[in-house]
Image (tube, grey):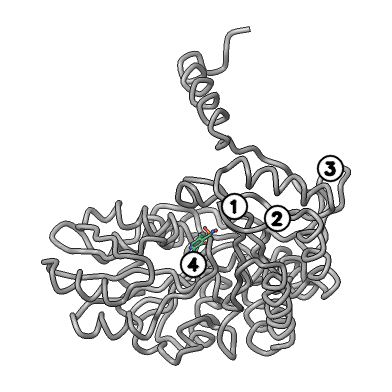
Amino acid sequence: MKPAAPVADGWARADLEALSAKGLRRVLEPLDSPQGAEVRLGDERLVNFSSNDYLGLAASPAVRAAVLASLERYGVGSGASRLVVGDMVPHQRLEARLARFERAEAVRLFNSGYAANTGIIPALVGPGDAVFSDALNHASLVDGCRLSRARVVVYPHADAAGLARALAETPGRRKLVVTDSVFSMDGDVAPLAELVAACEAHGAALMVDEAHATGVLGARGAGLCEALGLEGRVDLRMGTLSKALGGMGAYVATSRAVADLLVSRARPFVYSTALPPALCAGAECAVDLVEHDPAPRERLWGHIHRFTAGLRALGIPAEARSAIFPVILGEPSRALDAAQRLREAGLLVKAIRPPTVPDGTSRLRFCLSAAHTTGHIDLALEVLRQVGVSRGP
Ligand code: PMP
């Protein structure tokens, strides 16, 4: 039989071999259960510490019921981009609901966090402008900066003074600063008050990616900006529907004019089919749950504090800042070996390797969820003790 891709197949084989030699080849493994504290993977039942389903909403009965009701009424696909004929009542309802949740003038939906970040930045800045990006920002922000063709200045991680210097030294018609609020691979939190002050001092706009903070931080679960009372001083607050909200998609909370501009200019918004309406109805239900029932968030924070104390007792440095806990091990092979040993003991904790994290910092990344029980948290700590995983390259 002729190869399916006569030229590209040779390229792929060579590249796959090179990736395998460095321990950097990635493979897929399908779960055969909903997301949750315990999942099925082939014949294995594993305690899941790798999902971003921080509040256990991905399989929530209330969210499922909202999705099913909307599915019956609106069908599955949206049929077109929102600007053509894909704009449906559930999209508009969700934007209005999210604007109330975020206490924002306006909200614009995107199909994913990746689409939001790669769409918003080029919609606002371009050649002749400058965009300032934290060194550990998520890949989608990095790609949004590159696509904008603005000058990109990478400032040292979480360094507000470094940012202020860069803002002062760099010419640019418009200046936009972009940062994660909770950094996705380290779980630490941006010094947001200081970043806001630097932006205000230099007339720069600020965009904050709250992907891992929405639902987790803030009294209402609206993220780090809410927790610090900075909502009104951040130009763009981006959040995802795919993590604590348990679904798929993303949004940005901003001014009416910015939200209107994105409709005309953000390419992933203009040129991509709209989200399935039923997922919007599910997200609306999830936002109601997040805002009106603090119990899951409180349970999650109980787990965060318990896990922090337990890791420290094992000699693994940890801080209670978010639901993400890295255990940095160094080379990819060390992280892969550790993940395998944890898996043999019943824990699903994925190894994170370059280019997702810098060379030499391959790690295990634990994500906690309100769906876990304290028993699950204690099991993770006990397995880490038995397996003897300790931090450091
Ligand atoms: N921003 C951050 C900080 C993220 O961690 C992620 C997802 N891993 C995204 C954006 C992209 O979001 P989505 O998965 O909805 O595309």
- Which residue carries the number 2 mark? 389
Residue 12 visible in the picture = yes
**Numbered circle sitting on residue 388:** none
For badge 2, the amino acid type reads: Val
Q: Is residue 380 left or right of residue 202?
A: right
Q: Is residue 138 left or right of residue 287?
A: left
Which secondary structure, mark 3?
loop
User: Circle 3: is it few (<14), some (14-19), or many (20+) Cα within 10 Å?
Assistant: few
Which secondary structure, mark 4?
loop
Query: Could you tell which of marks 3 and 2 lies nearer the N-terminus?
Result: 3
- Which residue carries the number 1 mark? 329
For badge 4, the amino acid type reads: Phe
* Residue shown at the point (30%, 52%) measured from the top left: 147
User: Circle 4: is it few (<14), some (14-19), or many (20+) Cα within 10 Å?
Assistant: many
- Which residue carries the number 4 mark? 183
Which secondary structure, mark 2?
loop
- Which residue carries the number 3 mark? 42
Which secondary structure, mark 1?
strand
* Residue shown at the point (69%, 70%) measured from the top left: 311
For badge 3, the amino acid type reads: Gly
Asked whether the residues under the numbered discs 3 and 1 touch, taking CB atoms below 8 Å apart as contact, a structural biologist would say: no
